[in-house]
Amino acid sequence: MPLLTRRNLLKASAVAGAYGVGIGIAGKFGLAEAAPEPQVLKALKTQATLTDAGVTKNIMTWADAQGGAAMPPVLRMTKGKPYAARLTNTLDEPTTIHWHGLRIPNKMDGVPFMTQPYVYTGDSFDYAFTPPDAGTFWYHPHCNTLAQMGQGMTGVIVVDDPADPTFDSEVVLNLRDWRLGGDGQFIAAFRPRDAAKTGTYGTVRTANWHQEPQYDAPAGGLIRLRIAVTDVTRIFSLKMEGAEATVIAIDGNPVPKRFPLDLLLIGPGQRLDLAVRMPDSEGAVATLEDIRGTTPKTIAKLRSVGTSLKRNVGDLAALAENPVAKADLSSAEKISVVLSATAENAPVDSICGTLGYSFWAINKVPWPGDTSDPTAPLSELKLGKSYILQLENVTPHTHPIHLHGMSFTVLSSSTREVMPLVTDTYLVQPDEKVQLAFVADNLGDWLLHCHIIEHQKTGMTSYVRVV
Ligand SMILES: [Cu+2]
């Protein structure tokens, strides 16, 4: 049994109570829309062929109701429509599901101890919520994350907006690495010296669990390419060769002004929606590349098939903005958030997959997150009030900083021109100071952490409390 503090016991019973009331009222007065049948997501261990070395064992994933045990299914939801999933845990360790980027009630957020109890082996947990925003999101456990995510548990969510413009085809790419040895089996998930720097890179890169996969798409057509970086470490510098690619959304939200894809940096936890105009000639291949590092690396290919549809990216209607409240900058309170390395090397105990080191800190406090005894919140926020996170990175490394439960707008950066992007994850560069504005419009405790999982789990985690 885990250590249950009084605080967590109280929270667990409060969640159960709230459920009971909610169901009662909806049932009695028929106010709620009929709850959908939950999508079955069975957490399990499996094996898969990722390399020429043969089958990789000890892969973790979620199988759907049909029992397929391959890449986690791409979950399809509809903006403003209720969604439900039943997590059933057949792993030999506890797990949960966090829905990255979805602005949903706190009790559905999937952070053990903070928002829900562990889902133990043999147990189930019902998630039910209505996604308010359309776009590309993703899901992953928030428990023993370096192992569970590193060994496979990262999946993509597509939230459709029925009013979206029509594309000729859609391709979803789940980008991630695997730390495998020459025999195709998992090797140590991390090296401490790398965890204290960029994080430990995988050895095998995949898109949708395949190396350099190729997909067919209509020649001359407009393809919606949805990309999610679900890796625990790798930051990509994306480029498209052989086709015109236009950035239409970042992190689920439409960009204020579309622009051609040209060396866009995208870190763990981030998403990118591209409108790709396929080449006219049948058989022509467009290549998505990562040019970060010394040699460009092919991620995936798109091949033109059929007679050219002769489409024009300029004809594509705009995506609707998501209903994210605009911060009132005149009254917004500023919150200072300093990302730093910590000299403290003592392991912080966590039964949710401790790495045994403390390399990083937020406002000088190193906390690995998801522990039974949380640190104090970074700040206590008033429901409905506007805030500006003044994030300062005093480390020589890049950190994708993710806020749960609310989306913020990028206001300004000390080092570069920024667009007023609405997002849940900002890739903070070394020595960069950035201002992120948001309205505290979602009650509860919400994690703020680096999405390089080794950074998160060795101290770069905090949370805000909205009351
Ligand atoms: Cu980091």
Image (spheres, rainbow, N blue to C red):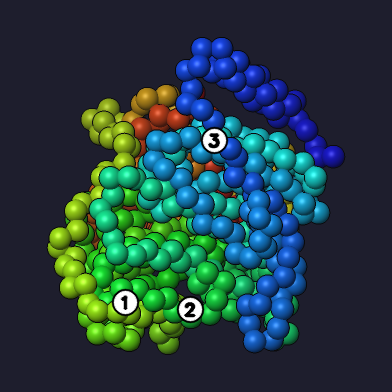
Residue 30 in percent (x, y) is at: 50, 16
Of tags 1 and 2, the one toward the viewer is 2
Residue assigned mark 1 = 240
Image x and y of residue 117, in percent: 70, 36
Left or right placement of residue 10 versus residue 250 in this view: right
Foreground of the two, 173 or 187:
173
Badge 1, how many Cα within 10 Å: few under 14, some, many 20+?
Answer: many
Mark 3 and 1 residues: CB-CB less than 8 Å, in contact? Answer: no
Identify residue for label 3.
Answer: 36
Query: Cβ(mark 3) to ligand 1 < 8 Å?
Result: no
Task: Give the number of the mark in front: 3 or 1.
Answer: 3
Q: CA distance from mark 1 to mark 2?
A: 15 Å
Taking the image as shown, residue 236 lies to the left or right of residue 177, namely left
Q: Amino acid at mark 3?
A: Pro
User: What kind of residue is marked 2?
Assistant: Pro
- Tell me which residue sits at (19%, 58%) in the image: 316
Element under disc 3: loop
* Image mark for residue 7: none
Q: Residues within 10 Å of mark 3 (few under 14, many from 20)?
A: few
